[in-house]
Image (tube, rainbow, N blue to C red):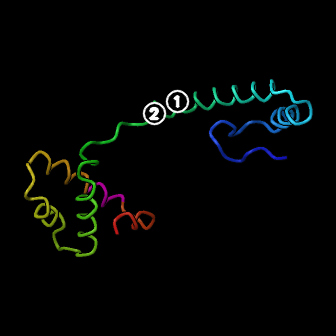
Amino acid sequence: MTRPKEGLTFLDVPEPPYTRAVLGVYELTRTERLRDLYTWAYERSAQEYLAIKQNLADPDPTRLAYRALIKDTVHGVVTNLPKDGLAWIDARLGQMRADRRALVRAHVIDDLRRLHEGVLARYG
């Protein structure tokens, strides 16, 4: 029997303890080892999750609120290839309040700078 290859709690659990714990259940009907292994792996996964969560930034509310407009504007710049891309972006965002327009414009320009073949599908 092989241990699970995926899953939050048994990720990177050493094979010998896992095998002994599972065999203990099947051959001896003893669940203590599997319970202890599961608890250890779960606590380890929870600590890794907390470490990752602390390093994540909060989502940008402007990017979330205007993600469709940002995507469409980037798509428009790439497909239309305007001579003055910044003026085209400004015209596209012209109906917005000035403070929001500046933030959305910055996101569009940032996305255009980061544009590469690996993310083209995102923009249609």
Q: CB of mark 2 within 8 Å of CB of mark 1?
A: yes
Residue at screen point 68% across, 30% down: 41
Residue 7 point in image, percent of width and height: 65, 43
**Front-most of residues 38 and 78:** 38
Can residue 119 be found in the magenta stretch? no
Residue 29 is drawn in which quadrant?
top right
Residue 101 point in image, percent of width and height: 14, 51
How far apart marks 2 and 1 lie (CA) works out to 7 Å
Residue 18 is drawn in which quadrant?
top right
Q: Disc 1 marks which residue?
A: 51
**Front-most of residues 71 and 26:** 26
Residue 10 point in image, percent of width and height: 70, 38
Q: Amino acid at mark 1?
A: Ala
Span shown in magenta: 109-114
Residue 55, disc: 2
Residue at screen point 34% across, 69% down: 124
